[in-house]
Image (tube, rainbow, N blue to C red):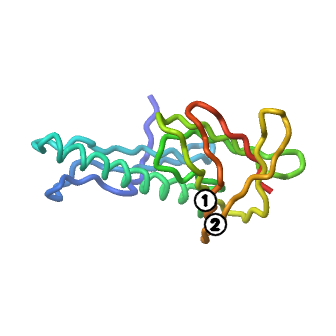
Amino acid sequence: MKTFKFHTVTPLFTEDLDFVVDNVRRLRRETGLNCIAFSLSMHPQGTPAAARAAKTIDAFRKVKQALVAILDALCGGRMPLLVDEGQDVSARLGRMRDGAALLAVFNANLDPLEGVRLRLTVPIAAVKRLGSDGAWHDLPFAAEGDGRYRLDVRLEIAVPGIFKLL
């Protein structure tokens, strides 16, 4: 059996700041790829249900921030693209033959998604959406600064949005 050497990125503590376990651990594989192990207790013991629910929601936000920071670090700066939404979405980024970025976003939440917020490492000058007619249509968007954009689109439940970022 092969053993691996992990590097501790951050430890996990209880609310009383007692050490529990290495929270984020990084392993560099022989191939040069980094692997990350992440752990977090989402249900503090002895906390009433209502307070536990509020803490869980807050914990999810903090976990997302931590995971984004970890992925940014693994990319050597920022990830090329982040769909920065509070709702559950699935995204896939590719490159078209003409060099444009092709982004597919799937709304996996139970509510429609009003606007799609993106964080990119390269600026965009125009956005097009693939219509049900198979043609590309101009899509309004707003630059919000620091590489952040908001696409003016409504994504219904379980309906993908296919976007061309120019």
The residue at the point 59 percent across, 46 percent down is: 33
Instruction: Say what secondary structure mark 1 lies in.
Output: strand
- Residues at marks 1 and 2, CA–CA distance in whole angstroms: 5 Å
Residue 62 image point, x, y percent: 36, 55
The kind of residue on which mark 2 rests is: Gly
Graded by Cα atoms within 10 Å as few (under 14), some (14 to 19) or many (20 or more), the crowding at tag 2 reads: some
In the image, residue 84 sits, relative to residue 134, either above or below, namely: below
Q: Is residue 38 left or right of residue 48?
A: right
Q: Is residue 41 left or right of residue 146?
A: left
Disc 1 or 2, which lies upstream in sequence? 1
Q: Is residue 84 left or right of residue 65?
A: right
Residue 79 image point, x, y percent: 61, 56
Residue 111 image point, x, y percent: 48, 38
Q: Is residue 124 left or right of residue 111?
A: right
Provide the residue designation for mark 2.
147
Nearest the eye: 16 or 111 = 111
Q: Are marks 1 and 2 in contact (CB under 8 Å)?
A: yes
Farthest residue to the right: give it: 98
**Residue 135 is drawn in which quadrant?**
top right
Nearest the eye: 3 or 18 = 18
The residue at the point 66 percent across, 64 percent down is: 142
Provide the residue designation for mark 1.
119
Give the label on residue 27, or none: none
The residue at the point 58 percent across, 30 percent down is: 158
